[in-house]
Image (spheres, rainbow, N blue to C red):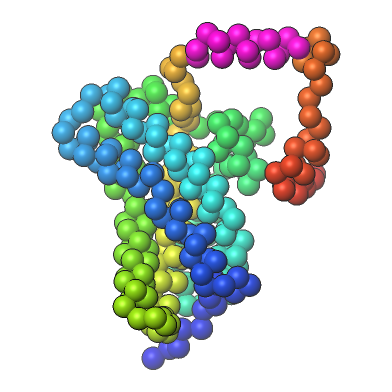
Amino acid sequence: MEQNTAKSPFKGITDGQFLNGLLPIVEHSLFVDRERLLALLATDADRDTLTEVFRECFEGYYYDVAFALDSYETRLLSILDSSDTYAALKHRVAIVQRKRRASPTGREVRRMGAFLPTDSVPEIKVSALSNHAFREFLHTLVKSEFFAAQARVVKLLNQRGEDAAETSVYEATAAEEVRLQEAIYEFFVCHLEFEQFLEDYEYDPDEGLEIQPEVAEELEQSIADHKSGRVKGTPLQEVAKTFGVNLKCTH
């Protein structure tokens, strides 16, 4: 039997640190919203109701889960690339990378609700889909392997917690660690595939939402102040320093 020689995702950080960072991702409300969407589709809910829950799913994924998984992307892709154990997963990653149209920066910008001028805008506009096509789109989304992979990770993490509660000293066996690693890698690759699926669709979660009069007035006043020079914007370098972001030149 071939020995599993894949590296651990925990290298450089402790097992506990990695899992503590993973928990908020796999326990995000996105996965509860997905169950709500699944139930609504089964009861033939109206489009407005489906649209509202889809918006919550979209925002939960793009603005929280995808951003969080980004912090592990370099580490996990490096592990997959350096091992022959996960050839099937590497093949799936390669397919995603070939299909991607947006640049890495473009994907980050899209998660903030915009598009780079250099990246193509998806041809399929979600709000323009017919009711039937919209429901078909949602059916495909909620049945994504991404959600099944998340359930497997949660199950293994729960089992780990139960075992730890039964003894004062818990150490995962080699087999248990391998199963958890495999589930994490699968979940990550499914995330890449899920994001690739959404890349084909243009969707603005704020489209159709009304702006409160006081908010609109503040925005208009802010724009006027900046145009008149009465208010100076904060330099990008200062914003980056405040949030601990390293600016990189892309040219």
Quadrant of residue 131 within the rendered picture: top left
Q: Residue 226 colored magenta?
A: no
Please state the total of marks drawn on the protein image. 0
Start and end of the magenta stretch? 211-225
| Residue at the outermost bottom position | 1
As drawn, 161 above or below 132: below
**Quadrant occupied by the C terminus:** top right
Q: Position of residue 61 (x, y in %)?
A: 45, 43
Residue depicted at 57% across the width and 58% down the height:
73
Q: Along the horizontal axis of the image, is 129 left or right of 201?
A: left
Q: Position of residue 28 (x, y in %)?
A: 41, 48
Q: Position of residue 15 (x, y in %)?
A: 52, 72
Q: Nearer the viewer, residue 16 or 33?
A: 16
Q: Nearer the viewer, residue 112 or 167?
A: 167
Evaluate whether residue 48 shows in this view.
Answer: yes
Residue depicted at 27% across the width and 32% down the height:
135
Q: Along the horizontal axis of the image, is 179 left or right of 38?
A: right
Quadrant of residue 174 within the rendered picture: bottom left
As drawn, 240 above or below 161: above
- Magenta region's main secondary structure? helix
Residue depicted at 71% across the width and 13% down the height:
223
As drawn, 85 above or below 226: below
As drawn, 185 above or below 191: below
